[in-house]
């Protein structure tokens, strides 16, 4: 079974007979659709840990292009300490700052039919990218990063003001951990050879950490971690959709 078939075994795309509910121990009931001009942004009021952090998100791409690609960005200009962004160029995961291109990883993740779990773990001056629990490669990024600093952070969009380079994807269960470098197994697990979400209960979110479940269509940026690190969303209620890593649309 290919790594992209994370939801097919359970009958995602159809819930007849309770197959999905029976297979998934942890349910994700909805996602959001991010497209051109859609933004999720927050500027922390105080800095957290800028050298150790973890980002986790479930993503299903809608279009593979050069111009719609942003995963996570902190800042809008300057070097690594004031701007850092991770993105897909077509299907290649890449990392850059305002002044340095940290390069592209070899895999091209071009599937638009299934959900994938994408994790960035940063510790010891190295960011490791994972897709469905498998390491895709690393970038060496030394010193303080802009992540968890007091600059604008964007999810699926640029951190700074304005639009452009939105990811054009569905996103679900978006988590940032401040101060702990977790393995992907903190947020997901393999079951019968399928990579599926699991309850992130017990996650230590830290000062600027958050958990975006997109449960409230009227408040898509609500943080469910207990930190109240809410994001400001430009999206209307129609951007909440039922398609998710554990249920089909």
Image (tube, rainbow, N blue to C red):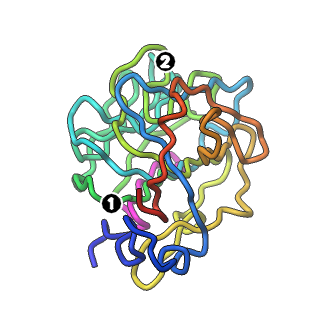
Main SS of the magenta segment? Answer: strand
* 25 in relation to 247, above or below: below
- The local secondary structure at tag 2 comes to loop
* 9 in relation to 226, above or below: below
Q: Give the quadrant of the C terminus.
A: bottom left
Tell me the residue that label 2 is attached to: 160
**In front here: 22 or 151?**
22
Q: Give the quadrant of the N terminus.
A: bottom left
Tell me the residue that label 1 is attached to: 114
* 69 in relation to 98, above or below: below
Whole-percent x, y for residue 63 in the image: 24, 41
The answer to whether residue 182 of the structure is visible from this angle is yes
Q: Residue at the spot x=66%, y=53% of the render?
A: 180
Q: Residue at the spot x=55%, y=64% of the render?
A: 183
**In front here: 24 or 77?**
24
Q: Nearer the viewer, mark 2 or mark 1?
A: 1
Q: CA distance from mark 2 to mark 1?
A: 30 Å
Q: Residue at the spot x=55%, y=47% of the render?
A: 174
Whole-percent x, y for residue 247 in the image: 47, 63
N-terminal of the pair, mark 2 or mark 1, is 1
Position of 156 with respect to 201 (left or right) is left
Q: Residues within 10 Å of mark 2 (few under 14, many from 20)?
A: some
- The local secondary structure at tag 1 comes to loop
Q: Which residues are magenta?
A: 122-136
Say whether residue 130 is magenta.
yes
Whole-percent x, y for residue 171 in the image: 46, 46
Give me the disc on residue 231. none
Say whether residue 199 is magenta.
no
Whole-percent x, y for residue 9 in the image: 37, 78
The answer to whether residue 52 of the structure is visible from this angle is no
Q: Residues within 10 Å of mark 1 (few under 14, many from 20)?
A: some
């Amino acid at each position: 079974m290919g790594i992209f078939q994370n939801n097919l075994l359970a009958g995602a795309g159809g819930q007849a007979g309770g197959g999905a509910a029976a297979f998934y121990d942890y349910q994700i009931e909805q996602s959001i659709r991010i497209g051109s001009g859609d933004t999720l942004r927050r500027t922390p009021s105080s800095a957290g840990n800028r050298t150790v952090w973890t980002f986790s998100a479930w993503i299903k791409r809608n279009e593979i292009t050069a111009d719609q690609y942003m995963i996570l960005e902190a800042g809008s200009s300057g070097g690594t300490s004031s701007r850092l962004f991770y993105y897909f160029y077509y299907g290649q995961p890449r990392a850059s700052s305002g002044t340095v291109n940290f390069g592209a990883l070899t895999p091209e993740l071009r599937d638009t039919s299934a959900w994938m779990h994408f994790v960035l773990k940063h510790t010891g001056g190295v960011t490791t990218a994972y897709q469905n629990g498998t390491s895709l490669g690393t970038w060496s990024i030394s010193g303080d990063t802009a992540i968890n600093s007091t600059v604008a952070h964007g999810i699926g969009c640029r951190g700074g003001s304005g639009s452009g380079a939105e990811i054009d994807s569905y996103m679900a269960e978006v988590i940032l951990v401040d101060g702990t470098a977790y393995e992907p197994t903190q947020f997901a697990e393999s079951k019968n050879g399928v990579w599926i979400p699991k309850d992130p209960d017990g996650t230590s979110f830290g000062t600027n950490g958050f958990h975006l479940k997109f449960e409230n269509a009227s408040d898509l940026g609500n943080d469910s971690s207990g930190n109240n690190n809410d994001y400001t969303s430009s999206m209307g209620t129609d951007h909440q959709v039922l398609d998710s890593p554990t249920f089909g649309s």
